[in-house]
Image: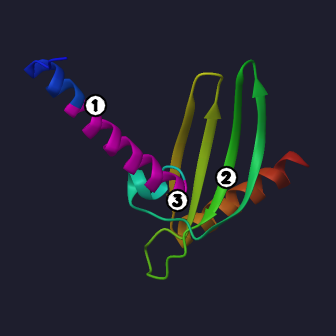
């Protein structure tokens, strides 16, 4: 059995690619999918998730995260809008400072109060 240069290169390329993918997936699953691996931000904990329902084959949910930041102006809360279908999984990340989180809380409270009038 002989190997030409192309075959050796193909094998080496596949091995390197596989090692990079294994490292990326391992890091992503150890530190919450997507947060540290992609954006360099880690979540302290996830207080909850809201199921937003299903439309056709698409299901959506909203996750709320505590970022654990102590510096002023740094994100203290994170929101993930998760969109799932049979063949895809998309996550849209939003980070909020303490002031932004309070504004969002007030806007949601106002929207709820106005819907009951």
In the rendered image, residue 110, in percent from the top left (x then y), is placed at 76, 56
Q: Earlier in the sequence, mark 1 or mark 3?
A: 1
Task: State yes or no: discs 1 and 3 in contact (Cβ < 8 Å).
Answer: no
Range of magenta residues: 12-32
Residue ID at (32%, 44%) = 20
Specify few, some or many for label 1: CA neighbours under 10 Å numbering under 14, 14-19, or 20 or more: few
Observer-side mark, 2 or 3, equals 3
Specify few, some or many for label 3: CA neighbours under 10 Å numbering under 14, 14-19, or 20 or more: few
Residue ID at (66%, 58%) = 64
Residue at the spot of label 2: 63
Q: 71 left or right of 66?
A: left
The span from disc 1 to disc 3 (Cα, nearest Å) is 24 Å
In the rendered image, residue 33, in percent from the top left (x then y), is placed at 53, 50
Question: Looking at the image, how many numbered discs can be counted on the residues?
Answer: 3
> Which image quarter is the N terminus in?
top left
Mark 1 falls on what kind of element?
helix
């Amino acid at each position: 059995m002989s190997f030409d240069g192309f075959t050796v290169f193909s094998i080496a390329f596949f091995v390197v690619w596989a090692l990079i993918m294994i490292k990326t997936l391992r890091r992503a699953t150890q530190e919450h999918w997507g947060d540290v691996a992609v954006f360099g931000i880690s979540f302290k904990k996830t207080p909850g998730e809201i199921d937003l329902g299903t439309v056709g084959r698409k299901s959506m949910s909203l996750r709320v995260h505590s970022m654990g930041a102590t510096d002023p102006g740094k994100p203290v809360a994170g929101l993930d809008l998760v969109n799932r279908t049979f063949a895809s999984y998309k996550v849209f990340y939003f980070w909020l400072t303490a002031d932004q989180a309070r504004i969002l809380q007030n806007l949601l409270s106002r929207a709820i109060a106005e819907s009951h009038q």
